[in-house]
Amino acid sequence: MQEYQFSDRSPNTPGRHDGGDRFLDFSLEDLERHLLAPEAESWSLRDWEQLRDFSVGSMQSRALSDEIRLRWGHVALSAISRKGAGQTAQQTAAESTHVRVYMIQEFGVSDADTYRSPHALCTEILRNLGLSREMVARLADGWKTAPRDQMLQLRRIKNMLTPLLLIRALLENDDPVFQETQAWLDFIPRLP
C-alpha cells in the first residue's frame, strides 16, 4: 500500500509533481474558483492527486505567507475529498489527517477553522475507523496470518492514527473524544 508523503520541493520547481505541470499555470485564486465550477466534476482521479500534491507542496513552502499557505492547505483538503470516490473512506481520512496535522503543527489550533481543530479531526477519525477497539485488539494479535483485507483494514487504521502522535499533547484532557482517541493511539505499535 502506498503511504502518503509530503513533498518538500519548492512550489516554483517545474515538473516537481509527476505530471502536475497542468497546475503551474493557475493562480491560487484560479484553482479556488475552479474547485467550485461544474467543470471540476469531470476531473480525473489523477488530476485530483496532482492537485493534492501541488497544493501540499505549496502549503509547505516557507517562501509564502502563512495566510497563502493555509489557503493551499484548504485546496489540498478539497482535492483529497474530491478524489474520495477512487478510494475508501479510511484512505481519504488518512490523507486528510496528514494535511490537517501539518496545518495544526505549523499554524496552530483554530476554533474558526475546523480543519485545524484537533477535536474535529479526532471525531472524523473515530467515525472512519470501521471497527471497535475490542475487534482491533483481537485482530492485531494475529495480523501476520490474517487475510489480506483484514491486514489492509488494520494498516489503514494505523495510517489514520499515526499522524496524531505528532499532536498527542493537544489531546491530553478530559474530553471524551480525546480520551477515546488516546486509547486508539496505544494500538499503533501493534498494527501492521
Image (cartoon, rainbow, N blue to C red):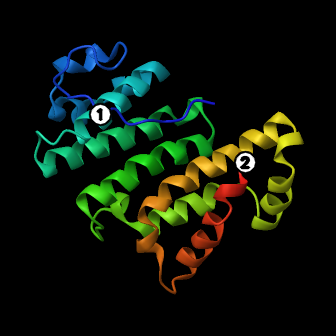
Mark 1 → mark 2, Cα distance in angstroms: 28 Å
Mark with earlier residue (1, 2): 1
Is 1 situated left or right of 154 in this image?
A: left
Tag 2: amino acid? Leu
| Secondary structure of the residue carrying numbered label 1 | loop
Residue at which label 2 appears: 154
Q: Position of residue 15 (x, y in %)?
A: 27, 13
- The numbered disc on residue 8 is 1
The answer to whether residue 9 is above or below residue 65 is: above
| Count of numbered marks | 2
Q: Which quarter of the image is occupied by the N terminus?
A: top right
Q: Nearer the viewer, residue 63 or 31?
A: 63
| Residue drawn at the location 42% of the way across and 64% of the way down | 167
Pointers 1 and 2 in contact (C-beta within 8 Å): no
Q: Reply above or below: 20 against 162.
A: above
Question: Does any portion of residue 185 appear in the rendered image?
Answer: yes
Q: Amino acid at mark 1?
A: Asp
* Disc marking residue 16: none
Q: Could you say which is closer to the camera, residue 169 or residue 53?
A: 169
Residue at figure coordinates x 57%, y 33% from the top left: 85
Where residue 22 sits, quadrant-wise, is top left
Judge left or right: residue 144 versus residue 22.
right
Label 2 CA crowd tier, 10 Å (few <14, some 14–19, many 20+) = many
Residue at 37 percent of width and 15 percent of height: 18
Give coordinates of residue 27: x percent, y percent: 15, 28
Tag 2's secondary structure? Answer: helix
